[in-house]
Image (tube, rainbow, N blue to C red):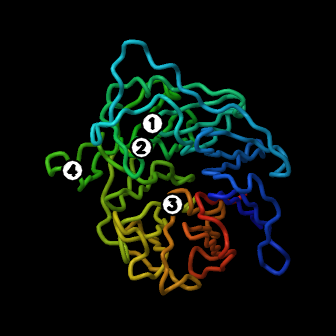
Amino acid sequence: MNQLLITTRKGLFIYTPAADGSYQVSQTAFLGDPVTLALYDKRSGYLYAALKHGHFGCKLHRSKDNGASWEEIATPAYPAFPEGRAPDRCPMRQIEIPWKLELIWALTPGGDDQVGRIWCGTIPGGLFKSDDHGDSWELVESLWNNPARQKWFGGGYDFPGIHSVCVDPRDSEHVTLGISCGGVWKSKDDGTTWQQAGQGLRAAYLPPDQAHDPEAQDPHLLTQCKAEPDNLWTQHHNGIFKSQDGGQNFTEIEEAGPSTFGFAVAVHPSDPETAWFAPAIKDEQRYPVDGKFVITRTRDGGKSFETLRKGLPQEHSYDLIYRHALAVDDSGENLLTGSTTGNLWLSPDQGDTWQTISNTLPPIYSVAFI
């Protein structure tokens, strides 16, 4: 059975299944520190953990022994700001966008043919790549220097950020990004050049004549079906959208149970018609509709949705699921989700029923299967 990899505001936790079906904490790391994201790289077996130390900034650590020990590795770094250049400014807030690392928001392995490749998406909107398992990082300047970046703006954070990196398993040079707020971007040449995608996404927070501007969209998370990678789903600030042409065009799903608003989405690894979402009340409130925490599931590409609640709290629940805190394993059977109130749940049957793993964790930032 799977181990569970959990990052929280107060450390990293690895859970291991016991013979009786329960899960116990088998490893902890960085207790007391905010661990904002973790990655298990199946190619090498390495674990990576991103930390945000406030005044001391972001750090990256790597484990080669399943979390028993950790070593600090290089952190993506921005170049010096060019002398004489006017500052970059957020077009919505008119605040200066810094040329320094604010948050590591995505960690994704490259293709099986790219030994050592890791992609790293950041706030304030930079994409980095490493070809030596994180020992060194290179800013993808073709995207950073793209004039369209001047239109990107912050959503929940003050500055824009890259939170989703999807690598096509058929072609490692084909990479698709989700950016808040900058829409969907694609490269078919390993990041040498980039093209705007995401036609059909809709931003109701903009005037009607700008609502379909692909450069101003806020996809909360973008995810790709491993077996059929032309199929992508996004949980957008404005709802749920799906694409069947590699992210070039999207169709909006207008009805999906209690709400189409949320942050997280997981897609079945071999069935692109099956996906899961964590609905919430939109914008200022951001908690489950009617205080009932549920997961929604579609098995027909968004034509219909089921509301899954067995084993989940159905009164006075204020659990919000962050964008990296809903995961499905490689079998497509096991689901894992963790909330901002420190609750952790596991489903062995695609969400039909849920088992509580913990009610006492710190606020959960991300979950993954090992």
Q: Residue furthest front?
A: 55
Q: Secondary structure at mark 3?
A: loop
**Residue 207 placement, left or right of 132:** left
Instruction: Compare marks 3 and 2 and give the one earlier in the sequence.
Output: 2
For the residue pair 137 and 252, the one nearer the viewer reads as: 137
Instruction: Compare marks 2 and 4 and give the one earlier in the sequence.
Output: 2
Q: Quadrant of residue 52?
A: top right
Residue drawn at (59%, 25%), measured in percent from left and top?
138
Q: Quadrant of the C terminus?
A: bottom right
Residues at marks 3 and 1, CA–CA distance in whole angstroms: 19 Å
Check disc 3 and report the residue beneath it.
Answer: 322
Which numbered tag is attached to residue 179?
Answer: 2
Q: Give the residue type that dot 2 points to.
A: Ile
Check disc 1 and report the residue beneath it.
Answer: 125
Residues at marks 4 and 1, CA–CA distance in whole angstroms: 21 Å
Q: Give the residue type that dot 1 points to.
A: Gly
Instruction: Compare marks 4 and 1 and give the one earlier in the sequence.
Output: 1
Residue drawn at (31%, 72%), measured in percent from left and top?
255
Instruction: Compare marks 2 and 1 and give the one earlier in the sequence.
Output: 1
Residues at marks 2 and 4, CA–CA distance in whole angstroms: 17 Å
Above or below for 336 versus 72: below
Residues at marks 3 and 2, CA–CA distance in whole angstroms: 15 Å
Instruction: Give percent across and percent down for residue 189.
Output: 49, 27
